[in-house]
Image: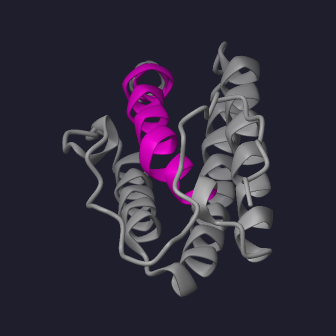
Amino acid sequence: MRPSPIHTSTGVAAAVPQEEHSQPPATTGAGAEAGYSLGDAEMDHSHDEFMQLAQQAASAQPAEFAPALQQLLQHTQEHFEKEELRMHSSDHRLLNEHRAEHQRILGDMERFCQRARAGRSTMARAWVRDNLLDWFSAHVKTMDSALAAHLTDDSSDHG
């Protein structure tokens, strides 16, 4: 049986195996590298938690993948909500663009969680391993670093 394609905003198009009999290889994407420190304790802590949960999901045994991905989704929803509140309260000029990116990735995560809960986790696992971690790396280095700089500038203006 051929897996049904899923369309995501991150463009998953990789061929994935039909069966999940063994644990996947360790994460090797750009998201696996260290160096996400932005000098903002709250953001840095949340990013560390995200990486731990994403790597746990990527390496979870098949029976544990759906719950691990759900836990990652819940963390990410909370992370984004807190980040967006900080952007709003500091009048960050890129709030709408940043929020739209959060909504896009949460939509993808929710769709893959649904698939994983339904027992169709092969593509979801590949997406976490091959797309989500790379997206996260780029997001931290661009949008979140701009936010951290804005928050630093904002606090120095008022402090």
> Considering only vertical position in the picture, is 68 above or below 16?
below
Q: How is the image coloured?
A: one colour
At which x and y percent is residue 64? 53, 84
Q: Residue 32 vs residue 159: left or right?
A: left
Residue at 64%, 28% (x, y): give it.
11
Judge by depth and name the residue closer to the eye, 12 or 74: 12
Q: Residue 82 vs residue 145: left or right?
A: right
Query: Looking at the rendering, in which quadrant would you find the N terminus?
Result: bottom right
Query: Looking at the rendering, in which quadrant would you find the C terminus?
Result: top left
Q: Quick check: can you spot residue 139?
A: yes
What secondary structure is the magenta-colored segment mainly?
helix
Q: Which residues are magenta?
A: 124-148
Q: Quadrant of residue 90?
A: top right
Judge by depth and name the residue closer to the eye, 33 or 8: 8
Judge by depth and name the residue closer to the eye, 67 or 152: 67
At which x and y percent is residue 12? 61, 34
Q: Residue 105 vs residue 63: left or right?
A: right
Residue at the limit of the structure toward the top, as seen here: 93
